[in-house]
């Protein structure tokens, strides 16, 4: 009878030890390309109601971001690239990284697919 109690005690200790370890987390990664001067919402999988979050942009001259009910709203100012990070201020961890590439209209980075546009001129008398 004492052996049964001892085994039960050991199993309870082992199961509580396995549950108490902190689970490893992966940083969610997103990438977006936006026209210069535009604003775009990025939908992320991170639950924004779970913790307190703040956003940091590596280069605020290129793009900044705010949180809203749709996710992360990114505003762009000039061409270039930057990284925007969603930081969990409660746990001091990065929850999401959004790589933002900003391009301007007529940029040389825009691929010319070589699709000719057919223009038809109609003259009415």
Image (spheres, grey):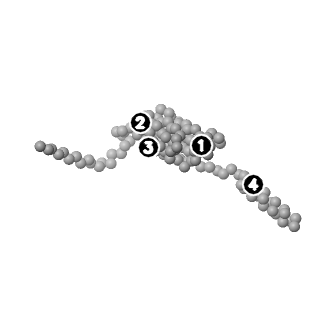
Dot placed on the residue nearer the N-terminal end, 2 or 1: 2
Dot 4 or dot 3: first in sequence order is 4
Of label 4 and label 2, which has the lower sequence position?
Answer: 4
Considering the numbered disc 3 on the image, is that residue within a helix, a strand or a loop? strand
Which residue position holds label 3?
33
- Label 1–label 3 contact, CB within 8 A: no
**SS assignment at label 1:** strand
Q: Earlier in the sequence, mark 1 or mark 3?
A: 3
Q: Nearer the viewer, mark 2 or mark 1?
A: 2
The tag on residue 17 is 4
* Alpha carbons under labels 4 and 1: distance apart: 26 Å
How many callouts does the rendering have? 4
> Going 26% across and 47% down the picture, which residue do you hit?
117
Residue at image x 36%, y 39%? 105
Q: Quarter holding the N terminus?
A: bottom right
Q: Which residue is disc 2 drawn over? A: 37
């Amino acid at each position: 009878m004492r052996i049964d109690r001892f085994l039960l005690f050991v199993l309870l200790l082992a199961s509580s030890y396995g549950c108490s370890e902190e689970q490893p987390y992966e940083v969610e990664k997103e990438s977006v390309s936006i026209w210069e001067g535009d604003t775009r919402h990025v939908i992320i999988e991170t639950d924004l109601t779970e913790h307190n979050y703040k956003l940091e942009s590596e280069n605020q001259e290129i793009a900044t971001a705010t949180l809203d009910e749709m996710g992360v709203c990114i505003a762009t100012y000039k061409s270039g690239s930057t990284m925007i990070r969603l930081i969990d201020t409660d746990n001091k961890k990065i929850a999401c990284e959004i790589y933002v590439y900003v391009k301007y209209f007529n940029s040389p980075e825009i691929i010319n697919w070589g699709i000719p546009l057919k223009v038809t001129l109609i003259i009415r008398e």
